[in-house]
Amino acid sequence: MKNKYFLIAFVLMIIISCRKAVEFDFVDEPAQLVVESFICPTDDSIKVNINYTKNYYDQTNVKSQIAKDIPKATVTISNSSFTKTLKWSVKNNAFTIATKEMPLLEDISYTLRITTLNGLIVSGITKIPKKIIGADFEIIKGVIRGDSRKDKIILKQQDEKGVKNYYEFRLALVFEDYYSGMLNQQIQLLGESLIDDESDKLDNVSASFNNTVYNQSNQGQQVPNSRRYYRAIFIKANEEYYKYIDITKKNHDASGNPFAEPVSLYTNIKGGVGVFSSYQIQYKEVNF
C-alpha cells in the first residue's frame, strides 16, 4: 500500500515539474466602425446601423462607448446633386431619414459618409439597381397522395442584358385568420436563393422551392375569414449586396463546425468594415 501511494506522489511531482508558463503577446487593435445599411427606393425610410469592433481580451465597457459616441456622429448620404444628413433615432437605435426626403433614383450612385466625435471617418458607395422586370410566379401541383401533395413553386425574373446582375428569391408560407377582430398571422420561410449573373449569360433567372400541401381540413382552414397563401419576394441587387449576404450565410453555416473552411467577411466600407448596399424589391402573393 505504501508503494502505491509513493508511486502516485512520484507521478504528480513529475506532472507539476513539467509545467511551464507561456506568455502570449496579444495585439491590441484599435476599434473600427462597423456599418450596415441596405437602401431601397420603395422603403419608407433609409436606415444606417453603426457599431464598434471589440478586442476579445478588451475588458472595457464598449457598450457605454457606443451609447456615448455613436448617437453624436455625423451621418450623410449624397449623390451628385445634394447631400442629406440623417438623424439619430432612439426607437430604431440607428440613423434614419424618410425616403420621401431623399428619393432614391435607379442607376444613380450614392455615397455614405460617417464622422465620429473621436475622428473616425468611414465611407461607402452604392449604385441603385434598375427596377425588376418580368417577376413571375408558377406553381406546379404534385400528385395527391393520401391527404397531401408536394408542390413545386418557381419564381422568375427577366435578366437585364449588358450588366452584371445579382438576384435573391425568397418564398414564405403565410397563414392568416381573424379572431375577435384581430389578424393572426403565421409566416414560415420555405427557402431563399442567391443567384449571380456576373458573366451576363442568362436571359432569365429563376429559383424553385418545394412545399407539402395538406388537406384543408387537416390545416384547420375551414375557419371563416381564414387564408393561406405563398408570399414571393423578388430582389434585384448589386455586387456588394450579393457578396455580403453570400459570405454572411456561409459564415453562419460554418459557425460551430471545426472542419469548415475559414470565411473572410466582405466589406465595401472604406476606413471600417461592413456594407453599404442597395436593391430593388417586389412582392407577389398567390393563394393555394
Image (spheres, helix red, strand yellow):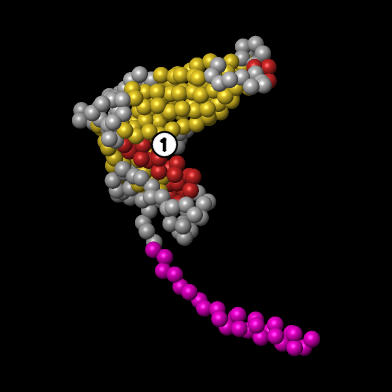
**What residue do we see at 28% from left, 25% from top?**
160
Q: Is residue 6 left or right of residue 273?
A: right
Secondary element at tag 1: strand
Task: Assign the N terminus to one quadrant of the image.
Answer: bottom right
Q: Is residue 103 left or right of residue 178?
A: left
Q: Is residue 45 magenta?
A: no
In the rendered view, would you say 221 is above or below 246? Answer: above
In the rendered view, would you say 208 is above or below 285? Answer: below
State the residue position of label 1: 94
Q: Is residue 6 magenta?
A: yes
Residue 158 seen from this side: yes
**x, y (%) of residue 77?**
29, 33
Amino acid type at mark 1: Ala
**What residue do we see at 70% from left, 85% from top?**
7
Task: Assign the C terminus to one quadrant of the image.
Answer: top right
Residues 182 and 165: in front is: 165
Q: Is residue 11 left or right of residue 173?
A: right
Residue 143 position by quadrant: top right
Look at the image and give the residue range highlighted in magenta: 1-27
Residues 207 and 280: in front is: 207
**x, y (%) of residue 46?**
37, 30
In the rendered view, would you say 102 is above or below 28? Answer: above
How crowded pointer 1 is (Cα within 10 Å; few <14, some 14-19, many 20+) is rated as some
Residue at the limit of the structure toward the left, as seen here: 80
**What residue do we see at 61% from left, 83% from top?**
14
Residues 176 and 88: in front is: 176
